Image (cartoon, rainbow, N blue to C red):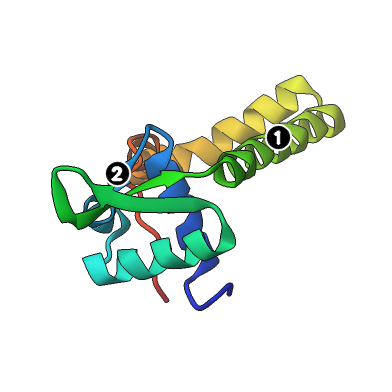
């Protein structure tokens, strides 16, 4: 853990900010958290340098959150790592076997609706 919040939650915050800035209160619902919990995660990510907060010009009580350059670099690094793993998987298994593996892994996600939720950025982190 970094600073107390579950690291997995950071990825969900990143996903919800890829489209642009959002209010902290608007992140709470999709993350399955209270606004206070979302604020705590945002504060932690701000300390790390991934996010920046500023007052909402329409409501000075609310805070707008957005990715910093460091946050965008982290997203890019994650994408590059996934691409490298995919390339290695394809090199080791071969294209057809890799495609079959991905298809096999997609079936349970499709069956449970998890893939649909993930693609819509509605898949919530599990709190243990």
**Of 25 and 16, which appears nearest the observer?**
25
Place residue 95 in its image quadrant.
top right
Image label count: 2
In-image side of 108 versus 112 (left or right): right
In-image side of 74 versus 85 (left or right): left
Place residue 97 in its image quadrant.
top right
Image disc number at residue 80:
1
The residue that appears at 85% across and 28% down in the rendered structure is 91
Q: Position of residue 23 (x, y in %)?
A: 26, 49
Q: Position of residue 94 (x, y in %)?
A: 81, 25
**Of 63 and 87, which appears nearest the observer?**
63
**Quadrant the C terminus occupies:** bottom left
SS for callout 2: strand
The residue that appears at 86% across and 33% down in the rendered structure is 92
Which mark lies nearer to you, 2 or 1? 2
SS for callout 1: helix
Location of residue 120 with respect to 126 vertically, above or below:
above
Image disc number at residue 56:
none
User: Dot 1: few (<14), some (14–19), or many (≥20) neighbours within 10 Å?
Assistant: few
Location of residue 98 with respect to 70 vertically, above or below:
above
In-image side of 16 versus 49 (left or right): left
Q: Are marks 2 and 1 in contact (CB under 8 Å)?
A: no
Query: What is the distance, in whole Å, between disc 2 and disc 1 at their CAs?
Result: 25 Å
Q: Position of residue 56 (x, y in %)?
A: 22, 47
Residue on which disc 2 sits: 22
Q: Is residue 103 something that shows in the picture?
A: yes
């Amino acid at each position: 853990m970094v600073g107390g919040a579950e690291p997995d939650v950071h990825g969900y915050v990143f996903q919800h900010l890829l489209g642009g800035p959002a209010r902290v209160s608007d992140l709470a619902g999709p993350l399955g958290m209270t606004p206070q919990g979302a604020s705590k995660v945002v504060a932690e990510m701000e300390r790390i340098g991934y996010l920046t907060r500023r007052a909402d010009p329409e409501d000075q009580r609310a805070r707008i959150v957005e990715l910093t350059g460091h946050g965008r670099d982290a997203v890019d690094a994650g994408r590059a790592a996934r691409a490298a793993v995919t390339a290695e998987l394809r090199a080791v298994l071969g294209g057809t076997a890799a495609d079959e593996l991905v298809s096999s892994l997609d079936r349970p996600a499709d069956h449970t609706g998890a893939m649909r939720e993930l693609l819509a950025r509605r898949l919530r982190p599990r709190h243990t």
